[in-house]
Image (cartoon, coloured by chain):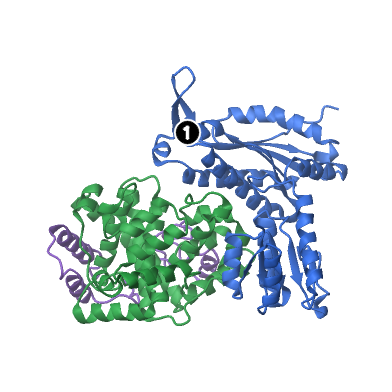
């Protein structure tokens, strides 16, 4: 398994560049350095808080159901576009 | 009216009444966390605390009060039962102790003695609470007599005058108190019991620490001061990065924002014998440091002449 | 209603300390027990908890230290208070005896607003970004107070939101005769917190009332909206609050700005999700 993005410690300092091959001892070292998460190459992972995109979009609509303010509707559109773009299945 | 704070295991209305009759303001709290909160934000003039309440928490509180809050002269009386007399007195920064079944006249006498002792000891600067010149001189001379390898740092607040002119004395006092807090905390963190901080007067401070720690301490004081100083500036000045005001001739002048400069005098191999020599050397180095803009420190690396 | 408002204020005057989430305190206690822990690591955790942050700021701005209403960030507070005082503060922090499921949601909402406020402040090139993030973290402190000190009213408010489809804000006004902005303001003024934190806390739903810190207040107002829009955490009701014209005008943002901000915010929120996950003790490795 390989690191796909810069690894940062808990103070946001970069401690490793993308491309490093991971093993148990490296992971342990990262943990000691205060790394909370890292991104690896491969298929998208399902985070425990993530729902299918359709469900999220439905919820998004509900949250905006009380408003007709064009600026807020613009915000909604932007969020929608961003999600559709960033969460496209590979 | 002096305030006396009681932190006890059980309510003792008799004691409260006793102190109130003596014209003392009494506060007592029976829930430790809240009591500690209150004490740390509004320290009393005297503290009576029961050891059995929670030995560890009591110890933490005492250390916080006496060292971090520079209240070394705040009298603390410990209530101890006979079975606990074996306490580690080196470790416990208390001034006196008595047993829970003490008789009222003795209790009062102890409290008055504690107040009197605190008054005798205090040569602290009224603004910052830090030890003043008598204590500074005594501390440094004592270290010199022992020939200890120490460093003495003279800390100076640069551009304090334009700051005062711009914002007034009250805010000037605030920034001096903040600097005092920073000095105390940094020296405590790196030098522990081996460190000392004093307030010479005005915008002049001094710290003493073991020689190897001096540069680290100086750098951290500078970092922390520069980090905190924006809290004391108005946004417009912060954006400009300087004060703009008129001098006596009515010309517009720019003054840099406050910074600290530190002159460090090392006492290598017992080079100095008297405090006077140290302050003379410090005065020379200070001249150089003050010319450098921003917060800086300078360690005297010159060799002894003889 | 007036009598009730007076009664609420009376209770607020007596308020000693607010409880926080037990896992935050246990994580801090663990950190403090480790000799190698630095002040910075402790600050990192405190900065993620609205109650502890307010506690630390209350202490450093108390009259005793001699610079009331000055200090607005946790990092400055830690530098000035020192490790020992922070340690004692953490060890004596009170916690919720019963943590409810909404509690974590309210914490996440505040964390999200802190992140969004910081990012907006950065985008608008404000000098005091850390402070704006702190204001964002503390903006809903009033809700914590209602939850902790007036649990009975809190339940009534939630019921009203549920049954009448009112916003949390409207429900607060009906039940309490005041709302969380006023409650938060009342407390942070008593605690001597700087005006630059007070105004955003007090006026993030009434930005026109801000006097000296209009931009900061408007940022918190918009950050609140964005975080609610993203559905991050729980602000008490499921709807995006209304955008105030003045706030929008003061900030002068457009579509392109928001488009640039969303990915930045998303990355920051991802980090925070890991934090809350860790706090929940679920672990993820």
Residue B158 in percent (x, y) is at: 57, 33
Q: For the residue labelled by badge 1, is the local secondary structure a helix, a strand or a loop?
A: helix
Q: Is C250 positioned to the left or the right of C12 in the image?
A: left
Chain coloured blue in this rendering: B
Residue B198 in percent (x, y) is at: 70, 44
Residue hosting label 1:
B166
Q: In the rendered structure, the residue with mark 1 lies on which chain?
A: B
Chain coloured green in this rendering: C
In front here: C208 or C175?
C175
Quarter of the rendering occupied by the C terminus of chain C: bottom left
As displayed, is residue B305 above or below residue B109?
Answer: above
Measuring 78% from the left and 62% from the top, which residue is drawn there? B95
Q: Quadrant of residue B297?
A: top right
As displayed, is residue C103 above or below residue C62?
Answer: below
Residue C254 in percent (x, y) is at: 19, 50
In front here: A40 or B274?
B274
Q: Is A78 positioned to the left or the right of A31 in the image?
A: left
Q: Residue furthest front?
A: B21
Residue C167 in view in this figure = yes
Chain coloured purple in this rendering: A
Quarter of the rendering occupied by the N terminus of chain C: bottom left
């Amino acid at each position: 398994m390989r690191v796909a993005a810069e690894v940062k410690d808990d103070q946001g300092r970069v401690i490793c560049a993308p491309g490093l091959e991971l093993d148990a001892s490296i992971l342990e070292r990262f943990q000691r350095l205060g790394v909370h998460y890292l991104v690896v190459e491969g298929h998208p992972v399902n985070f425990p808080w993530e729902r299918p995109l359709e469900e999220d979009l439905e919820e998004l609509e509900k949250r905006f159901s009380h408003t007709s303010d064009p600026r807020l509707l613009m915000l909604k559109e932007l969020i929608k576009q961003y999600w559709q773009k960033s969460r496209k299945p590979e | 009216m002096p305030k006396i704070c009681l932190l006890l295991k059980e309510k003792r209305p008799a004691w409260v009444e006793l102190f109130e009759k003596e014209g003392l303001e009494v506060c007592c709290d029976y829930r430790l966390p809240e009591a500690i909160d209150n004490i740390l934000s509004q320290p009393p003039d005297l503290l009576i605390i029961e050891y059995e309440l929670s030995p560890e928490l009591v110890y933490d509180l005492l250390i916080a009060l006496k060292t971090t809050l520079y209240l070394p002269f705040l009298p603390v009386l410990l209530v101890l039962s006979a079975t606990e007399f074996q306490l580690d007195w080196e470790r416990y920064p208390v001034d006196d102790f008595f047993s829970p079944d003490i008789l009222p006249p003795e209790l009062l006498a102890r409290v008055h003695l504690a107040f009197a002792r605190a008054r005798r000891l205090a040569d602290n600067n009224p603004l910052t609470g830090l030890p003043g010149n008598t204590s500074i001189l005594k501390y440094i001379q004592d270290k010199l007599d022992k020939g200890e390898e120490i460093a003495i740092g003279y800390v100076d607040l640069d551009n304090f005058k334009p700051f005062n002119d711009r914002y007034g004395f009250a805010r000037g006092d605030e920034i001096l108190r903040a600097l005092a807090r920073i000095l105390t905390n940094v020296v405590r963190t790196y030098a522990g019991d081996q460190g000392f901080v004093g307030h010479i007067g005005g915008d002049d401070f001094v710290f003493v620490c073991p020689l190897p720690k001096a540069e680290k301490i100086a750098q951290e004081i500078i970092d922390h001061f520069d980090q905190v100083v924006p809290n004391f500036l108005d946004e417009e000045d912060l954006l400009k990065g300087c004060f703009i005001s008129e001098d006596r001739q009515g010309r517009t002048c720019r003054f840099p924002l406050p910074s600290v400069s530190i002159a460090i005098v090392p006492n290598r191999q017992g080079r100095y014998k008297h405090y006077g020599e140290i302050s003379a050397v410090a005065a020379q180095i200070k001249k150089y440091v003050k010319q450098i803009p921003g917060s800086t420190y300078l360690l005297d690396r010159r060799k002894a002449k003889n | 209603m007036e009598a009730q408002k007076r009664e609420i204020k009376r209770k607020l005057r007596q308020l000693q300390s607010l409880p926080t989430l037990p896992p935050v305190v246990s994580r801090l206690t663990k950190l403090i027990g480790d000799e190698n822990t630095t002040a910075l690591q402790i600050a990192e955790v405190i900065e993620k908890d609205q109650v502890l942050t307010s506690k630390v700021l209350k202490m450093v701005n108390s009259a005793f230290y001699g610079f009331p209403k000055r200090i607005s960030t946790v990092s400055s507070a830690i530098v000035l208070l020192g490790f020992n005082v922070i340690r004692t503060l953490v060890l004596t922090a009170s916690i919720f005896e019963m943590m409810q499921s909404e509690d974590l949601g309210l914490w996440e909402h505040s964390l999200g607003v802190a992140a969004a406020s910081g990012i907006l402040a950065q985008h608008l090139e404000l000098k005091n970004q850390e402070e704006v993030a702190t204001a964002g973290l503390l903006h809903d402190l009033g809700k914590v107070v209602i939850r902790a000190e007036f649990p009975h009213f809190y339940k009534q408010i939630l019921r009203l939101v549920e049954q009448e489809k009112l916003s949390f804000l409207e429900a607060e006004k009906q039940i309490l005769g005041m709302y969380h902005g006023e409650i938060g303001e009342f407390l942070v003024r008593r605690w001597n917190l700087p005006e630059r934190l007070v105004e955003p806390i007090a006026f993030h739903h009434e930005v026109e009332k801000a006097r000296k810190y209009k931009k900061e207040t408007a940022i918190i107002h918009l950050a609140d909206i964005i975080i609610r829009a993203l559905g991050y955490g729980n602000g008490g009701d499921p709807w995006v609050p209304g955008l105030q014209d003045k706030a929008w005008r003061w900030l002068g943002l457009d579509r392109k700005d928001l488009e640039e901000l969303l990915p930045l915010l998303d990355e920051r929120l991802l980090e925070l999700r890991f934090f809350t996950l860790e706090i929940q003790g679920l672990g993820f490795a």
